[in-house]
Image: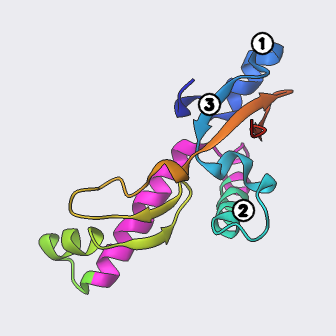
Amino acid sequence: QSHGFGNPKYAQAGGEAANGTLFPCGRLLVAEQLPDDHPQKALLMSYKKDYESKHKEDASTFGGHAYDALLILIEGLKKAGTDDREKVRDAIENVKGLVGTAGIFNMSPTDHTGLDVEAFELLTVKDGKFAIAPKQ
């Protein structure tokens, strides 16, 4: 499976057949299962609470991507001190250690994704819910 499976509705719709499905995904879907000292936990829990109280449905990774884009833009605007496009781009390319829903962003002129493999957790489905897959 791809990380596109990371929507609680897919796991619920799959019923028992979805149990055991493995897929890589950001940690938003399993925020409650993270240790309290995980660098993303506070942001993830806050995002989930705000999203779910406003929209009356489970948060998925897709809304988190838009949220992260806004965080990156705001950080770029702050660092640039202007809305000049080139200066904002340059500032975004120097964003380091920005905690988002998808991971901890470290941008560069050659990496506009800003995430590496450490941003992903291997998840599984158990009884219609997502869980961190046991390490093997």
Q: Position of residue 57 (x, y in %)?
A: 72, 43
User: Going by the picture, which residue comes out furthest to the bottom?
Assistant: 81
**Region of the chain picked out in magenta, as a range:** 52-79
Crowding around mark 2 (Cα neighbors within 10 Å: few <14, some 14 to 19, many 20+) is some
Above or below, comparing residue 63 to residue 80 in the picture? above
Numbered disc in front, either 1 or 3: 3
In the picture of the structure, the residue carrying the numbered disc 1 is 17
Numbered disc in front, either 1 or 2: 1
| Residue type at tag 3 | Phe
The disc label shown at residue 23, or none: 3
| Residue type at tag 2 | Met
- The answer to which of 107 and 128 lies nearer the viewer is 107
Quadrant in the rendering for residue 25: top right
Is 131 inside the magenta-drawn segment? Answer: no
Above or below, comparing residue 77 to residue 33 in the picture? below
From the viewer's perspective, tell me whether residue 86 is left or right of residue 39. left
Task: Tell me if label 2 and label 3 are in contact, CB under 8 Å.
Answer: no
Label 3: which secondary element: strand
Quadrant in the rendering for residue 86: bottom left
Q: Mark 1 or 3 closer to N-term?
A: 1
Instruction: Tell me the distance, in whole angstroms, between the alpha carbons under discs 1 and 2.
Output: 29 Å
Dominant secondary structure of the residues highlighted in magenta in the image: helix
Label 1: which secondary element: helix
Task: Tell me if label 1 and label 2 are in contact, CB under 8 Å.
Answer: no
Q: Position of residue 17 (x, y in %)?
A: 77, 12
Above or below, comparing residue 57 to residue 66 in the picture? above
- The answer to which of 68 and 120 lies nearer the viewer is 120
Above or below, comparing residue 108 to residue 55 in the picture? below
- At 21% across and 63% down in the image, what residue appears? 109
In the picture of the structure, the residue carrying the numbered disc 2 is 45
